[in-house]
Image (cartoon, helix red, strand yellow):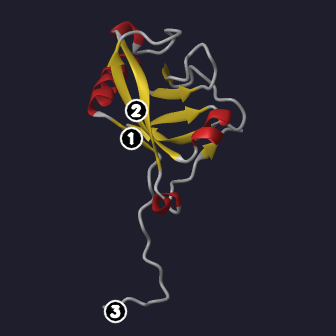
Amino acid sequence: MPINTKEKIMKPKISRLAATEKALEVIWELEKKYGDLMFYQAGGCCEGTQPQCFEKGGFYPRMNDAMIGTIHNHEFWIDRDLFEYWQYSHFTLDVTDGFGPGGFSLETPLGKTFKVHYRLFTPEELENLEPVKRSE
C-alpha cells in the first residue's frame, strides 16, 4: 500500500532515562524487600546530587519537580532547578560499591550507591523527546 506523502511517519519517542544491568539487579533486590519504589535526584549539597531510592510515597517531590521517566515502572523524579540545568541530557542510572553521602537511600545497607551517567542528546533526539511530568 502506498504511503500518503502528507502523512508523517511517527517516530518512537526518545527516552530520557535508562538503567544499567547492575542497577536493575539492585532495583530487583530492593523491590523484593520494599515493594514499589521511587527515585529522586535533588540538587542540594547533602545528598551530593546523587539519585536516592525510596519506598514509593517515602518522599514527596516539590512543586514543579520533573518526572523524566520510569525504571522498571518506578518513577524517577528530578529537582526542578536541577532539571533546568540537565534537561538536554540523557540519564543512565548505574550503581557502584560504597556509601553515598547522606545514607538515606534504600541501597545503602547493601553497600551500594546509585549514580547517574549523563550524555547530551543529539539535535535529532531533542526533536522527539518523551515529555516530562511536573509535580503540582
Q: Quadrant of residue 17?
A: top left
Image marks 3 and 2: residues in contact by CB distance under 8 Å: no
**Residue 2 marker:** 3
Disc nearest the viewer among 1 and 3 = 1
For the residue pair 98 and 28, the one nearer the viewer reads as 98
| Residue 81 location (% of width, % of height) | 68, 34
Q: Is residue 99 above or below residue 48?
A: above
Neighbourhood count class around disc 2 (C-alpha, 10 Å): few under 14, some 14–19, many 20 upward: many
Tag 2 residue = 93
Tag 1 residue = 18
Q: Earlier in the sequence, mark 1 or mark 3?
A: 3
Q: Is residue 42 above or below residue 125?
A: above
**Residue 86 marker:** none
Residue under the point 47% across and 79% down: 8
The answer for how far apart the CA atoms under marks 2 and 1 are is: 6 Å
Amino acid identity at mark 3: Pro
The number of callouts visible is 3
| Residue 5 location (% of width, % of height) | 44, 89
Q: Is residue 84 above or below residue 59?
A: below
| Residue 29 location (% of width, % of height) | 30, 20
Q: Earlier in the sequence, mark 2 or mark 1?
A: 1
Q: Quadrant of the C terminus?
A: top right
What element does badge 3 sit on? loop
Amino acid identity at mark 1: Ala
The answer for how far apart the CA atoms under marks 1 and 3 are is: 36 Å
Amino acid identity at mark 2: Leu
Q: Quadrant of residue 21?
A: top left
Image marks 2 and 1: residues in contact by CB distance under 8 Å: yes
For the residue pair 110 and 29, the one nearer the viewer reads as 110
